[in-house]
Image (cartoon, grey):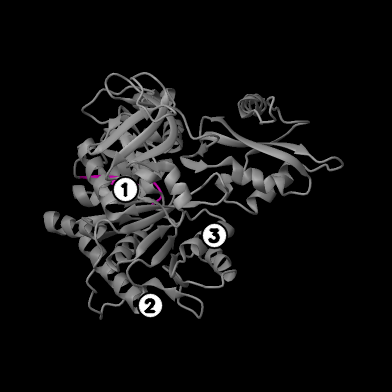
Amino acid sequence: MKLKDLLENNISHYGEYPFIYYKDQQYTNIKTRLYADQIANGLHKLGVGKGDRIVVCMPNNPEVIYSYQGITRSGAVIVPIMFTLHPKEIQYIIKNCEAKVVIASSYTAENMRKAIEGLEVKPILVVADLPGSDEMINLYDLMSPDLAVTEDNSNEDDVAVILYTSGTTGNPKGVLLTHKNLFTNAVNSAAHNETERGVTIGVLPLAHVYGLTISNTCYITGSSVVVFTRFDPEEIFKAIETFKVKAFSAVPAMIHAMVGSPKADQYDTSSLEWIGSGSAPLPIALLNGFNKKFSAKVFEGYGLSEAAPIVTAHNKKIKIKPGSVGIPLPGVSIKIVDDQGSEVPPGEVGELIVSGDNVTPGYYQNSEETNKVIKGGWLFTGDMAKVDNEGYLYIVDRKKDLVIRGGFNVYPRDIEELLNAHESVSEAAVVGVPDEAMGEEIIACVVKKAGYNVMEEELIHYCQDHLAKNKTPKRIVFMETLPRNGVGKILKTRLRETAATIITI
């Protein structure tokens, strides 16, 4: 099955119904298909063919969903980009995937223009909500109702999406996800959760694999989705009350904001039965706090882009074990292995490896990194974990040095390389420290060069000039030296302890 079939089967099984609610408007599944076909027609008119890469970079809105379906119907590959990225980061992705077209909105158009300016081969810029000009095409002007939809000749093993995820080398890697990867994960996720037909909330970024999968499950379950451009607790409460929402998915930072919001009691949220949590560790106290405040359960799960993404999760038929991320989805197998690749007994810590139809075939034009993580049909996640005697998974530690801020992965080396390039910085090390609201916050430990007196604010602004704001340090901690072991390796464990102490003062 292909991503196109998600919408076709939805219409066949459920008939016409309001599929998207956005602001004060509603759009049916039939309208979604019409717009998707027209986008596919317009892309073909631009010369887009099978396998061409099409970037989509804008905040959540109906046009993102139309574009995803239109791109897949054209036989092209969807390349979602987070709308918060810096133009330099966007430029790297566009260049690396050799995008033929980029689809943006007024919110991201300026960053797109900056990103495209420096490219030798420039993609065509399409914007959803700005008038056409010499340098861009309006999305609705692009749509071509007068053309017959070209037959899609792709198959389920073809790449449907390339998701760029930060790499420890400083450049993001393009995770290849096939139609089968995404389709089966959405089907198995809906089956695992026994998701009922209804109205859910689409506040997770559609450019993130978690948000993409949640939207895909709506096709399968015949559900509607209330799409939000940004997260606002009061708007979420209002939507729960208005649409009698029973369940939706979020990240811990959102859950934290809901629990702490004084507006919650002003709305009737009694319909809410459960909320799914992923993308970052969920503190047990927050799980209990949510349950107490909303009389609703939290089903924590685990996933990663390379697994399309959901690997394990709790559901309403099994016992919730705080601290665990649940059990594997149907069709997904997990093992905990030692350094030699041998499976370890329950309770012992090792590396988590995953297999199933959801596992990526590899990274775009990066066989070296692919061979590091795909071995014998298994995905080596790099996450240290254990399972108990009932098959529940516990993530003990994450990939080395990874910081997860607000549900998004941030690799310290990206920031360290940038700081080390500053004229006043002798050396820098970046760590994550626990933060109640964001899960983790980013702290940079910096040693100044002799004779320089750079200030904290200056270095933070410097980082923001080169990286997306969510990837930049919250604080700069200046140190005389960085702690090292006997062979000169920086002791980041000690840095985390020091940074956590300083940050709480």
In this view, the mark in front (3 or 1): 3
Give above or below for 452 relative to 335.
below
On screen, residue 417 versus residue 386, left or right, reads right
Local crowd at mark 1 within 10 Å, few (<14), some, or many (≥20)?
many
What range is drawn magenta here? 198-206
Is 205 within the magenta? yes
Marks 2 and 1 sit apart, C-alpha to C-alpha, by 28 Å
Along the line of sight, the residue nearer the viewer: 41 or 77: 77
Marks 2 and 3 sit apart, C-alpha to C-alpha, by 23 Å
- Identify the residue at image location x=60%, y=69%: 118
Q: Mark 1 points at which residue?
A: 213
**Pointer 3 with pointer 1, Cβ within 8 A:** no
Q: Name the residue under label 2.
A: 46
Label 3 SS = helix
In this view, the mark in front (2 or 3): 3
Is 301 within the magenta? no
Question: Percent from the top left, x then y, of residue 463?
Answer: 65, 48
The amino acid pointed to by label 2 is Leu
Question: Percent from the top left, x then y, of residue 132?
Answer: 45, 77
